[in-house]
Each structure stands twice: as structure tokens, then as C-alpha cells.
Amino acid sequence: MLSHWDVSGGLSDFWAYVREPRPHRWAVWGLAIVLPILIFWGFSKYLIPYEEPKLGIVYFENWKGDRSAAEVRAEWVERAKETTRANAKRRAEFQRLADGLGVDYDSTEADKVTRETLGAEADTLAEKPAPPKRSTLAERAARGPKAGPVAQPQP
């Protein structure tokens, strides 16, 4: 059935149906064409809105034309150090979060790169606090009940 396609019979039946004079055929044809167009237009307009790009000012740095290669390199190094500082601070925050959640978080490789880049300054940025001392249930039970205010008998 699928290997022998013959659509000519279906097309001729469709054309014969279209040619029959019916009282409201042009109104029905108009509605059948306009309604899907309106639906597709509505979806394209309101489902995925398109905002016109707004005019804006783009700022950029202006450098002297006679900068030396050493000055350019010094600026690159300073920007790289700023990025490394920000990453070290973020990594320390993640370490505190991981310690609080009890998750293993190993940043030794990244800390090594930070130390190579920043030197002694890296030790102050990535200070990792000692994990908080928490008592376990067994330790609490061994200490006994917490001593509270003793109620005096009323006469």
C-alpha cells in the first residue's frame, strides 16, 4: 500500500467538491484561510515577543598609541590577578558551604595555581576556616543532662 502512491484520485475528488456550487462556500473558504493566518500571527507576535534593540552608548578604554609592550603586559597581568583574586574568594565561599553541608570539596589544584599567580597574597585570600566543632549524640549523652535552674519548692 505504501509503495504505490496514487494521489490523483484524491485530488480529483477534492477538486470536484470545491467546484460544487454551495451557498456559503466563499465565506467558509475565507474563514478557513484567514483563521489559521490569524492564529499563526498571534503566536508569532505574542508567544515569542521580539523587542527592538535599544540605542545605547558603548564605552571603551582609550589607550595611548605609544604604549610599550611592558605596559601592555603589566595591564594584562593586573587584570589576570584581579580575576584570580575573585576566583579565590569565590572558591573560599564554596569551601565554607561544602564544609557546612559536609560535602568533600577539593580545591588544592586551583589553590596551587592561585599561589603561583598571586604569591603570598593568595594565603590571605583563600583562608579556609577550620570546620565547625559539632557535638555528636554520643558526646551529648556522655555529658549527661544539661544543668538548668533548679526549681525551689513553694511553701
Image (cartoon, rainbow, N blue to C red):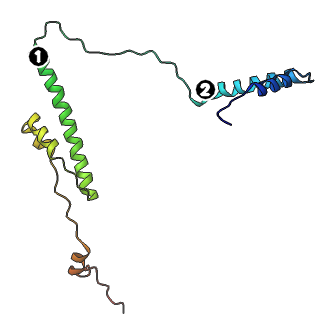
Residue 139 against residue 151 in the figure, above or below: above
| Disc 1/disc 2 C-alpha distance (Å) | 52 Å
Question: Label 1's element?
Answer: helix
Residue density around tag 2, few if under 14, some if 14–19, many if 20 or more, within 10 Å: few
Residue 21 against residue 63 in the figure, above or below: below
Question: Label 2's element?
Answer: helix
In the picture, measured across the screen, residue 30 lies left or right of residue 130, that is: right
Which residue is at a point 82% across and 26% down the rendered structure image? 13
Report the amino acid beneath label 2: Ser
What residue sits right under mark 1 in the picture? 71
Foreground pick, 3 / 154: 3
What residue sits right under mark 2 in the picture? 44
Which numbered marker is on residue 63? none
Residue 55 is situated, as x and y percent measured from the top left of the image, at 45, 15
Q: Quadrant of the C terminus?
A: bottom left
Q: Quadrant location of residue 5?
A: top right
Residue 71 is situated, as x and y percent measured from the top left of the image, at 11, 16
Residue 138 against residue 54 in the figure, above or below: below
Return the residue found at the far bottom. Answer: 155
Report the amino acid beneath label 1: Glu
